[in-house]
Image (cartoon, grey):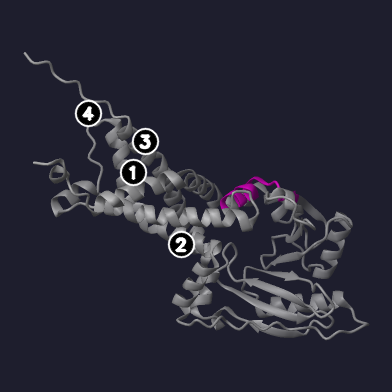
Amino acid sequence: MSKQKGKKKKGFKHWVGKAHLWLGLASGLIVLLLSVTGCIYVFSQEINGAIRKDEIYVPEVKETRLPVSQLWNETQKTLGDSIIINRVDVFNNPEKSVRFFCYKAAAQKNSIFYFRNIDYYYTVYTDPYTGKVLGIYDEKKDFFNTIKMLHWSLLLETEIGQPVVGWATFIFVIMLITGIILWWPKNKAARKQRFKFQWKDTTQWRRKNYDIHNILGFYISTIAVIIAFTGMVWAFTWFQAIVYVAGSQSITPPEVKREQSVFREKSDKDAAFDIASQITHERHNTAGAFGLSKATDSTGVISAYVQQYEGTYYVNHQLQFDQYTGKLLNERLHDEKNFGEKLITANYDIHVGAILGIPGKIIAFIASFISGLLPITGFVIWWGRKNKKAKPVKAKK
């Protein structure tokens, strides 16, 4: 028999295995980093809430709050002229302080790194009853913000880091699919054995590592794919468009009205801002919180973002007000959005599991943790096979 005839034909699973191996080696480190940072960030709201408790909650609840414009102006005076407030968040919970955000990007991007292209990023907590600033936090180098930006773009500029993260995530999805193809048993008898750990005292660590890689990988694959897909929504505009079209059953983008203020030379903008705040509160007094931003030019509007449930973003409403009079110009409720828009809006809450509350976050944490184990256990399997010691040949008697 010739060598050619003696060669076994390489089947489908052989090439699937090759793809699984080389794609895994190419993306493993990034997948590990994304998984670890995802694990850490899942409970960032809860941990920060505990750390900043004295600033988030007021010392004493009083009968009346100061006008939002007064709180804005007094907080701005405390910060000085070098730090400018961009937005205020007002909570309907009377025990909570108002929260101001101050963010400024560098005038010119002269670096590929995230930190070097930000002038400042602060969160300020102010007592709504007294106007006293309770705490100022530098978010630029905050631990959880650093973790978030590592996860978002590897601490690189978004235009550079996000595609890298996106393609690594895309490869991870292929890895999950090819892994299941390779592992999936041929018959029912084999299937029963592969769905659970069957370790004995004599089971070697290499076998345990192999089972951890395959069995845990199988069980978290559905959740991991959902987490990966929601990550890709941010990384790729084309993928976000696919999600929108699939959800809305339409290729037409949603029409969002951009209102304009009617310029008035003499007007009380602070009074208009307070009117906008009051109208937002009255129309959405059951919401968790709402954020207000001032107009950026002479025809711009006061923008309000209503967060229906505190801690999540999947239900929200937008309002626009005339900056000179506080008149409501437009309101877009969550129920007016099509399903494609709602799906995109819910993307963050799905990604971190917050859409299901604490149980959802726990599921996301476990799935992320196991996702981080996959490149490690996979590498150990590959290394073990590559450096497999040949069995000693028995001497003939």
Q: Which residues are magenta?
A: 137-151
Q: Which of labels 1 and 4 is toward the front?
A: 1
Quadrant, the C terminus: top left
Label 2 sits on what residue type?
A: Phe
Q: Quick one: SS at disc 2?
A: helix
Q: Which of labels 4 and 2 is toward the front?
A: 2
**134 on left or right of 51:** right
Please name whichever residue, 203 or 165, is drawn nearer the observer in this view of the structure.
Answer: 165
Is 144 covered by the magenta stretch? yes
Name the residue beneath numbered marker 1: 213
Label 1 sits on what residue type?
A: His
Which residue is at 24% across, 36% downward? 199
Q: Which of labels 3 and 1 is toward the front?
A: 3
Name the residue beneath numbered marker 3: 380
Q: Is residue 214 above or below residue 232?
A: above
Q: Main secondary structure of the magenta part?
A: helix
**277 on left or right of 228:** right
Label 4 sits on what residue type?
A: Thr
Which residue is at 22% across, 28% downward? 202
Q: Are marks 1 and 4 in contact (CB under 8 Å)?
A: no
